Amino acid sequence: MSSAEVLAVIPARWKSQRFPGKPVALIARVPMIVRVWRQVAQAKTVHGVVVATDDERIASVCRDHGVACEMTSPDHATGTDRLAEVASRQGAEVYVNVQGDEPIIQPQSIDAVVTCLLAARGRGIHISTGYIEGATPEQEASASCVHLVPTMDQCVLTFSRLPIPMSFREPFRRNVHVGLYAFTASALRQFATWEQGPVERAESIELIRFLEHGQRIACIPIPAGSIGVDHVEDIARVEAVLAKRSQ
């Protein structure tokens, strides 16, 4: 158990260009947002889990399944902005942003990112995230995949939807960023006061806001295995994993 009070928040919105209504899509007869909430609730470092949404249809599904939920403004640019609104009402020392389209995210991955932040605070770092080592050829070809380049001391050098870094002289094993972030309360409050910068807007990667304001982000490798649901056809991939686990 961590030494800090940790609240996990799962931002969920209805509108999506690729997959409208994605949070309530059924995966093996269970709404996706419910599956995410159940996975997060198993994390040992987390003391509370809440869904943050601006859509009553999502909130209704949450209530029907006993999932804690808060209504938030429809005007937020990112999920972290939505998390910041929840943080203004629910006090904690650390907040974890867990993507609402990761129905089989591993609780151990959440614990790893939280523990990474708790250790990084001693270096004056107030944000952490995770990544998977070794992108597949499919991930390198997809703009839905975000790549993370770490520094030698395990902080984020940069993010991009391009398969970076480019390698001219020798093969380079690229990393896949996981949409899992932990913030101290002060970092989250600061994030909410900043406008989106040009690189964040260009890449549509919200953590770049911290980098554009000169902040360091600790990062840690986590195990592969989770599947983000970006398209309808990804549901079948998740259901295949769940079926294999139940055998």
Image (tube, helix red, strand yellow):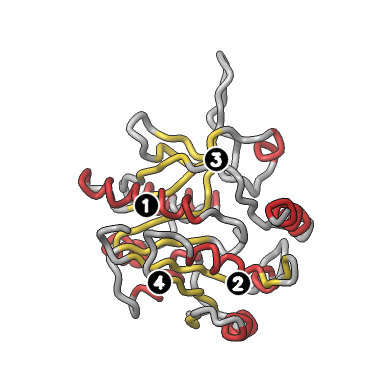
Q: Which of label 1 and label 3 is nearer to you?
A: 3
Q: Earlier in the sequence, mark 1 or mark 3?
A: 3
Tell me how far mark 4 sits from mark 3, CA to CA.
29 Å
Q: Which residue is mark 3?
A: 147
Amino acid bearing label 3? His
Tell me how far mark 4 sits from mark 1, CA to CA.
25 Å
Q: Earlier in the sequence, mark 4 or mark 3?
A: 4
Q: Which class describes the residues within 10 Å of circle 1: few (<14), some (14-19), or many (20+)?
A: some
Q: Earlier in the sequence, mark 4 or mark 2?
A: 2
Secondary structure of the residue carrying tag 4 is strand
Tell me how far mark 4 sits from mark 2, CA to CA.
15 Å
Q: Which of label 3 and label 2 is nearer to you?
A: 2
Amino acid bearing label 1? Phe
Q: Which residue is mark 1?
A: 210
Instruction: Report the residue at 44% width, 50% height from top.
Output: 208
Instruction: Report the residue at 61% width, 67% height from top.
Output: 35
Secondary structure of the residue carrying tag 3 is strand
Instruction: Report the residue at 72% width, 61% height from top.
Output: 18
Q: Which residue is mark 4?
A: 48
Outermost residue, top side = 169
**Residue 99 lies in what quarter of the image?**
bottom right
Instruction: Report the residue at 53% width, 49% height from top.
Output: 178
